[in-house]
Image: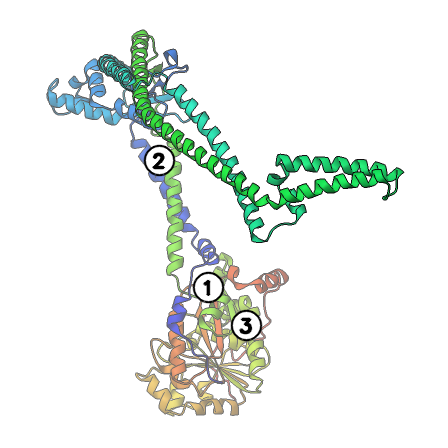
Amino acid sequence: MNPPVIDIENEQESSLLNPAQIVDGMKRHFWIPLTLTFLGLVLGYSYYKRQRPVYEATSVGQFGSEQGSILGMDTMTGQTLRDEKAINTLIQAAKSRDVLGRIVTDLNLANRTAFAGPHAAGSKEARDAAVATLGAMIKISLRKETRLIDFTVAGEDPDLITSLANQAVMSLVSELENQKSKTLQTAVQSLVAEGQRLQEKLKKSEIAMHDYKRQNEAISLDERKDLVLTKLKELGADLNKQSKERLMLETHLQAFKAGGLPRDQLLNLPTIANHPKVSGLLSQIGSQKAALAVLAERYKPKHPKYQSAQAVIDNHEKQLEVLLGDAVGLLQSSYDNAVELEKKLQAQLKQQEGDVLDLEALAVQYNVLKREMESDQAVYESVLTRIKQVDVSKGMETPPLWVHQLAMTPTAPVSPDAKKTVSTSAAGGFMMGLAIIGLMVMRDRSIRTVDDARMKLRLPVFGMVSNLRTSPHDARKQEDATPIDGILSSHKQVAENMREFRTIITRKTRNEKACFLITSAVPEEGKTFVSTHLAVSLATQDLRTLLIDMDMRRCTLGQEFGLPEDCKGLSDLLLGTATLRETCFATGIHNLAIMPAGRRIHNPAELLATCGIARLKELAFEAGFDRIVIDTAPLIPVSDTLVLGDLADELFMVVRCNRTPSVITLEAIRKLQQAGVAVSGLVLNRLTQRTRGYDYYFYNSYYRTEQSEDVPLEPVGASSGQRANPAPFIQS
């Protein structure tokens, strides 16, 4: 199966910071914010002790009025102090050079060294310096949702700052009073001048109005206009009525000329039916028919009276027929009269409209002159009223600002505040510590958890080794213990981890004999530790296990088991100067043998590549070993491990958590991929308990009192309490 191809650049981009990493970083580096917090406490307290006490004095002024102005009118000051701009203007006026200069003069601050500075007392430069210093000391602010302004002065002399605060509000009140007096005087003069001008203008308007009325006889212009408009409306109504009548006659006449109308339709026409002769005949015919109906009840149709009445009706009918025969003449006569009357009404209406337009032209100029005169009169009267109000309200209106409360001499300083200073510095140190931890976590690209390893390295995790916890009692015991005792003591703490790792790789290989190769990206990741304890765990399963040290540049595996440095090992076997039996040594642990690296050589990579290293596995299996665990050199510094790809059945890479950057491990995996070597999986070393996962917590609670794995010892020329002798493991 081909190894998965890993894109290192994309992996670097996908390594994002998440809250879980921050929490983990805070747990690991909690000492940083604690240390900085303590340092902040010390610095804050030192700063507090070095500061001189500062006092504050506050006087209060109130602006605006609780009641309306005199006579319900605003004063002529130009500002009612009811909007934000006016209030801000007042606050800025309190810091003007005039107000500050008044305070400097009243309190003789130009002669004080603290205000005058290096300038000569009483000089112009000293006065300017005193004004600048005073402006920096006074703080003016508006109380929210109130009419009150606070004048606050801070300094080291309580009596002086009290005098400055009181003088500040009183100087501003005096300045506003002076400005108000000047403004009122200027306003009165302006109003008097404006009144005289308006009086002359009103006089001219009245004269122009009088002349216009005389020239155009416009005395009763409104009444004439009303009469003309009334007559115009009446003529319009009459013309509309006559037009309707003329249209009706025209329609009847055209219908009669088009083909004649039956008698019944002619009689239905109002013009024919209302004709005197026609209406008279119709009335007589109606009365005769009524009389005939009465006779018909008493006599038969051939009776003389009945026939006489019938003859009268027939005579009237003939006369009506004669009249209806001349209906066109009646209609034409009525139509001509209606047309003539309509024309007369139209002429009268047109003449009346002209009279209305003439009156409108006269009214336009008349109204212009009238409005101008009325406007001039209203403005003139308003100015006169305003002058009277200003004269009456002089000295009676409340000032725009008055003293609400004078400052009291402070008895306790406001700064420095011990609690505030110390707590702020401590909080700053704590926040700085959190920021440092955040930076460390952001820059940390190492593997922290199992999920990190799976996501970043894209390889399965077969083994997890927790951090070893050594108590002071265990440390004292290990000082007097042999190397084998130290290995067994540490194995008790990782036994469950190794059992899990052993079970997974055993089921993965499914071979009677297997060779496992353990490597890492860089030194000091724990590959030797993992190799050793994996071999011990395999040996406890009654599997004859050979542990080989192929890290020929740093030969430390033999020293871990107490072997002398001059004993023969792998290099001697490959060079042909020793046999397999001479290079395999008992460890004191049942079923476990070790093959050290042997004597040092200068070119281990060339030796491993050219001396038939593949034959070593066959020799070991022929000698009766069931499992081979090989501890190799790291991949990044040297290339020794790349030539061992065909030797192992499974290759596992050890990754030290919270230390090695993931890009380094990815580079090592890439080198193996380029060499055609497949990485079976990962072993995470020094995995913290909090990032291990739920399995650790269940294990820790279930095996709290039994965390050891029984490892039977096989004495080989020495007891377990003594140093193991380098006795050959393979018997002849």
Count residues near mark 3 (Cα–Cα under 10 Å), then give few for <14, some for 14-19, many for 20+.
many
Viewer-nearest of discs 2 and 1:
1
Front residue of 407/559: it is 407
- The image shows residue 324 at horizontal and vertical percentages of 63, 44
Colouring scheme, one of rainbow, by chain, secondary structure, one colour: rainbow
Q: Amino acid at mark 2?
A: Tyr
Q: Which residue is mark 2?
A: 45
- The image shows residue 381 at horizontal and vertical percentages of 31, 13
Count residues near mark 1 (Cα–Cα under 10 Å), then give few for <14, some for 14-19, many for 20+.
many
Residue 498 - label: 3
Q: Earlier in the sequence, mark 1 or mark 3?
A: 1
Q: Residue furthest front?
A: 304
* Residue at 40% across, 54% down: 438
Is label 3 in a helix, a strand or a loop? helix
Q: Which residue is mark 1?
A: 448
Q: Cα distance, mark 2 to mark 3?
A: 53 Å
Instruction: Classify 152 as above or below 70.
Output: below
Residue 490 - label: none
Viewer-nearest of discs 1 and 3:
1
Q: Is residue 394 left or right of residue 271?
A: left
Q: Earlier in the sequence, mark 2 or mark 1?
A: 2
- The image shows residue 641 at horizontal and vertical percentages of 39, 82
Is label 1 in a helix, a strand or a loop? loop
